[in-house]
Image (spheres, rainbow, N blue to C red):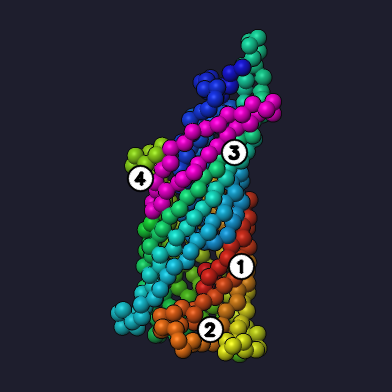
Amino acid sequence: MNRRFASGRRCPPARDHVRFGAALCTAVLLVSPRAAAQENDEVQARINYVYATQFGFGGYKVGGLNANVYQLPIAFTVDDVIGSWDLEIGLPITYGDFGFSTSVDVPVDREDGTREVENFFVRVDTNTIGIEPRLQLDIPIHALPGLRVSPFGAFGFGTTFDTSGSARSTSGARTNFSFTEGQFYTYQIGVTSLYTYPWNDFTFLLGNAFLYAGDATFGGGGDLGDDVEGYGTFRTGIEVRHPLGFTFYGIAPDVGAFFVYNLFTPSLQFTRVARRTLEIDEIFELGATVGAAKPYEISWLPRVLNDALDEFRIGIGYQTGQRLDGVRVTFGVPF
C-alpha cells in the first residue's frame, strides 16, 4: 500500500522529508486535498517565534500549536547616560518547546487499484533557543510629571534543535520524518510610554506601545530558505495598585490588577499542518501583580542590585483572543 500526496506524488514507505524551522516551518507531508490546493502541496506550520519572544515566560495554545516558553529576563539600567535619561540594557534568553498536532485525511492507493481515504494523526515537535539583546532609553517628560517615553530597538538570533515528527494512521502504520535544523533572527523596534498617577492610596499606570517586529531565517540555514515575516503592534494597558497595609522585613507590599489590549497589523499568522492559516488581530489580557509599594534597600547589596529590587515586580496574566489562550508570568510593568 502506497501513501500519496494529493497531487499524486508518492511518499517513501519509511519516512518523508520535512522542512521545519523556528519562525517559519514548511512541512511536506501527507497533505489533504483542501490544504494542497492553497499551498501547492506544501503546508506551512508557522511557530511565529518573534511573538513567542514577546510573550515571555509561560505557555499558550493556538490552533494545533502548543507552545511552552521559558525566558530569563536579564536586564540592567545605566542611570543618567544623557542628562536625566536612563539606558536599559536587556539580554533575555528564551527557550521554547513547540508542538504541532493535527489529524488529516489522506488518499491511499490499494493494490487492487481502488483508492480509499485514511486518517493520519500528525505530530511535529521542535525546541528553540535564542537571545535578543535590547537597548531602551527611558526619557522623563518634565512638562508632564509622571510621564516617561522610551524608544527601543532589539535584534537577536537563535536556532532549532532536537526536532522530530511522525504520522500515525488509524490502521497503526507509522511514518517518521527527517529534519534539518535551521537558524533564524528576530528584531523589534518601537516606542513605549508610561504615565504614573497617584491618587489617595492608589497608583494608576497607563501604558502604550507602538512597535514593529519580525523574524527571518538566515540564508542557507537548514531547509528554511529566505522566509520572512513581520507585523506591527499597538498595545495599550492600565494597571491599578494598592498597598496591602502591612510591612514584612521592612518591605511594604502592594497588589495590582491590570488589563492589556493588543492590536496587530497585519494579523499575527499561525499556519498549521494541513489546516487553513489562523490569523489573529486582537489579544486581550487580564492579570494581577505584586511588588513593593515603597522603595527599600538592603545595606549589604551593591547599588545596582538595590535598584533592581526597587523595580522588581511579578505577576500572572491570562491572554485570549481568536482561538489563542495563554498564561504567562510577568516581570515589572506588564505592558
Percent across and percent down for residue 156 are: 38, 56
Q: CA distance from mark 2 to mark 4?
A: 45 Å
**Which tag, 2 or 4, sits closer to the chain's start?**
2
Residue in the image at 52% along x and 32% along y: 177
In this view of the protein, can residue 170 be seen by the observer? yes
Amino acid carrying label 4: it is Phe
- Residue with the most extreme front position: 300
**Dot 1: within a 10 Å radius of its alpha carbon, few (fewer than 14), some, or many (20 or more) residues?**
many
Magenta stretch contains residue 87: no
**Dot 4: within a 10 Å radius of its alpha carbon, few (fewer than 14), some, or many (20 or more) residues?**
some
- 4 and 3 marks in contact (CB < 8 Å): no
Secondary structure under tag 4 reads: loop
Percent across and percent down for residue 41 are: 51, 29
Q: CA distance from mark 3 to mark 2?
A: 49 Å
Q: Which residue is identified by label 2?
A: 197
**Considering only vertical position in the picture, is 249 above or below 63?**
below
Percent across and percent down for residue 286 are: 63, 67
Magenta-colored span: 157-185
In front of the other: 283 or 42: 42
Secondary structure under tag 1 reads: strand
Secondary structure under tag 3 reads: strand
In front of the other: 162 or 334: 162
Q: Which residue is identified by label 4?
A: 218
Q: Which residue is identified by label 1?
A: 316
